[in-house]
Amino acid sequence: MVARLIHVEDPDDPRLAPYRDIREKDLVGRDGRFIAEGKVVLNVLLNGSRFEAESLLILENRLAGARPLLDAAPDGLPAYVAKAPVIDALAGFHVHRGVLGLGRRGPERTLEGELAHLPAEALVVVMAGVSNHDNVGAIFRNAAAFEADLVLLDETSSDPLYRKAIRVSVGATLKVPFVRGGSTKAITASLIGAGFRCLALSPSGGSDIAAIKPGGRNAIFLGSEGDGLAPSVMASMEAVRIGMSASFDSLNVAAASAIALHRLWRGAGQVSGPRPPPSGP
Amino acid sequence: MVARLIHVEDPDDPRLAPYRDIREKDLVGRDGRFIAEGKVVLNVLLNGSRFEAESLLILENRLAGARPLLDAAPDGLPAYVAKAPVIDALAGFHVHRGVLGLGRRGPERTLEGELAHLPAEALVVVMAGVSNHDNVGAIFRNAAAFEADLVLLDETSSDPLYRKAIRVSVGATLKVPFVRGGSTKAITASLIGAGFRCLALSPSGGSDIAAIKPGGRNAIFLGSEGDGLAPSVMASMEAVRIGMSASFDSLNVAAASAIALHRLWRGAGQVSGPRPPPSGP
């Protein structure tokens, strides 16, 4: 075991301060850090994340099950171990997942910096006004599955490092590079400047996604579920629709992203072998 | 207006009994009825549902916004109107959506009866062990968008008329015919007997979904997110995978259903015109 186990009995132990009142801090922010929860997500945080872990907090009776996680942790990472009443009093609710982790956000990346590092063939996902945490997380999960190189979120979309978004993404928000900020208009201009074909996914799109081929540099724009993409965004690029029933033309934005990203995946069209079943939840 | 407005002030009014303790009844069942909530879902219940509405319950200050709904209701449908404290005391939680409806389940359909009515070209979705209400609702939404003719759920999958499943489906569970019950093995045998090509969606599938063409009678089997389809189910039919990243082979079951159903949609390959933006949430 490489993580350093530290048994704690006092919910007021100052070393545990970042885990205090988790839900309230979800709302007001937590000063350059984020909380990840559950074994699947923490496994991504410790292996293959672009963020650094600062500590873990483990329910005492889940210690045996958490051992592979602890073995994979960086040498000396503090892993606080406590009984359920201590953790519940600290977190402010019943923590049934048993394992929590604290990550450091690190310096924010910039749009221009990220675009400069993309390969000649690249796939970018842009969220414009996607404020629902479940949808943000689900879109990141699809972005990781279909190997998007970068996710961009305008200033009105919600934070991918919000606890629930991380959980729904099964850790993809810790893995796929992203930049959040700026207007959709500014993001579009930067992408066009970097040679991207910008595609607005919309039921009123003039092209069918089934006719779009992967290859080159593609950016797919997703709007909010209620209002979709703004007319000014739609007018500035090619709009693409997903063919579906005329009498029930309603697709969740994350489901739409799955369909579009599967079509634009750079592996599409290649013959790939079957894989063993996934281990995720 | 065709619904009959009835103002109520007493949360103990016996006519409102079906709306009492909504969350508790979600767990124990409600005797042949179900609760639908929100304007989008109630609009489906009153227009294009296969179920009958028994009554509506509307927050007094939402009455103006609910008027189109009331106008579309069957003549004389009781629409109870009450202030927020009355509705909250009755329902047992804060009902922020403002409009609720009570539907009647009616006689359960049978697998053989439903199969007998399907057209020569048909698309069926089968859920085997899908117990998460959000996933059941999201899969129904995709089934409606891609015009599945029937949804079958094995006895271990959860109830599509559970309140949250109806809500997540944006009403699709009220619209797409379904039968719930029996084992996956029995469902498979009936589908094969009815001339269906049974396809198990699985990361270990030998065929790629991109190579499967719509047409004829297709049934797509979806397993639980954690464990997937049982080996015995996989062994009894053709297994199909969705090509994706080898390093993040994790797709939500509803996202997987969206991709597969879009490929198997009978409108796929046809040239369809763009549509106006959807009105759903």
Image (spheres, coloured by chain):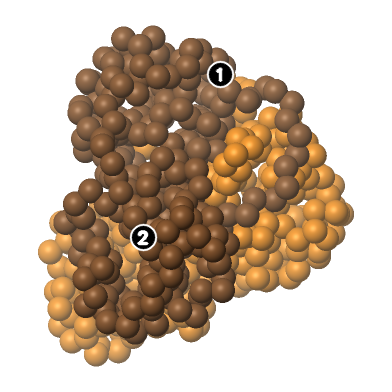
Chain colours: A brown, B orange
Give the image location of residue B164, x and y in percent.
42, 65
Question: Between marks 1 and 2, how big is the CA–CA gap?
Answer: 41 Å
Label 1: which residue? A214
Callout 1, which amino acid? Pro
Q: Nearer the viewer, residue A36 or A214?
A: A36
Q: Nearer the viewer, mark 1 or mark 2?
A: 2
Q: Residue at image x 27%, y 69%?
A: A16
Callout 2, which amino acid? Ser
Image quarter in which the C terminus of chain A is found = bottom right
User: Is residue A212 positioned above or below B89 on the image?
Assistant: above
Q: Residue at image x 75%, y 55%?
A: B115
Disc 1 + disc 2, Cβ < 8 Å: no
Label 1 marks which chain's residue? A
Label 2 marks which chain's residue? A
* Residue A55's disc number: 2
Q: Residues within 10 Å of mark 1 (few under 14, many from 20)?
A: some
Give the image location of residue A277, x and y in percent.
70, 50
